[in-house]
Image (spheres, rainbow, N blue to C red):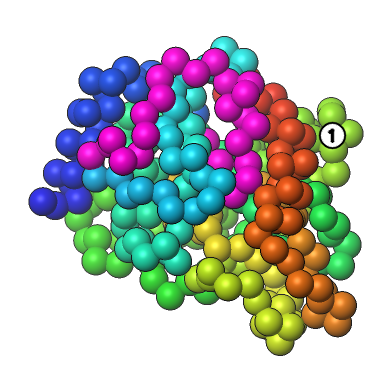
Amino acid sequence: MTLQQQLAETVRFLRGQGFEGARVGVVLGTGLGDLVRIMDVQKSIAYNDIPHFPESTVESHKGQLLFGRINGTPVIAMQGRFHFYEGYPMQQITFPIRVMHALGIQRLLLSNAAGGMNPAYGKGDLMLLDDHINLQPENPLRGLNSPDFGPRFPDMNQPYHPALGQLIKAAAAARNATLHEGVYVAVMGPNLETRAEYRFLRMIGADVVGMSTVPEVIVANQIGLPCAAVSVITDECDPDNLQPVSFAEILEVAGKADKVLSSIFADVIGQL
């Protein structure tokens, strides 16, 4: 079955489940799910019940697709995402972005947990992505040469939509929340980085490092879907003072910052 056929089948299934009319799509990253508490959830379905969806294998990723309203705006939310390190091909990882777009979303908001390499960033801080560096070993557009998917060579001059970024900055300022702006570097994972790797990543211009988001943003740009992304800084990655960090600690820090980020996203969604 071709990717076009899979997409059509999945969209048909979700429309039959009532997933229609959403204006905004949201991808909730590691340890980030408080937005669901704010959301008036009307429909919920497990990923493994959706045709052609992968199954989320990461602890803290609930693995559900939700439909409902946030501040009156109809939303589709991914409660958990997929990663290359889980073993899925990039086209499958980014398949939900194409599905949400085919269901009618006009804006995409993404969140992730990331390690902070910029010395000005602390645990629990937020960073709006202004740009990214892709060091993952595969690309979700490889092999897709049909115009059905969008241009084969999408321009990435401005991968994150400036107007959405301005809304996020204004919402953060209104809540007196610290919001940095910087560059995210995507690596394969799942291991955390060595001291030498942190030095290298900082040297090439990255402020934070993570294992997600960039493939979804590449696809969003290919299909003409404006997007914005925010990282929660879950650990401080100073190679000269590097301390061991556990996944449980990452989840704890993400959970504390999640309430602020979810409130910011809810404010923005209400304006879309």
Q: Can residue 55 be spotted in the picture?
A: yes
Amino acid, disc 1: Ala
Give the answer, above or below, for where 106 lies relative to 256: above
Residue 76: % across, % down: 45, 28
Give the answer, above or below, for where 19 lies relative to 205: above
Instruction: Find out whether residue 47 is within the magenta segment.
Output: yes
Residue extending farthest top: 72
Residue at 53%, 70% in the rendered image: 189
Instruction: Find out whether residue 37 is within the magenta segment.
Output: yes
Give the answer, above or below, for where 38 lies relative to 85: above
Please give left or right for residue 144 compared with residue 181 in the image.
left
Please give left or right for residue 48 compared with residue 272 in the image.
left
Please give left or right for residue 109 compared with residue 34 in the image.
left
State which region is magenta. Answer: 26-51
Position of the C terminus, as image quadrant, is top right
Residue at 41%, 33% in the rendered image: 65
Label 1, on which residue?
Answer: 173
Residue 247, picture quadrant: bottom right
Residue extending farthest bottom: 196
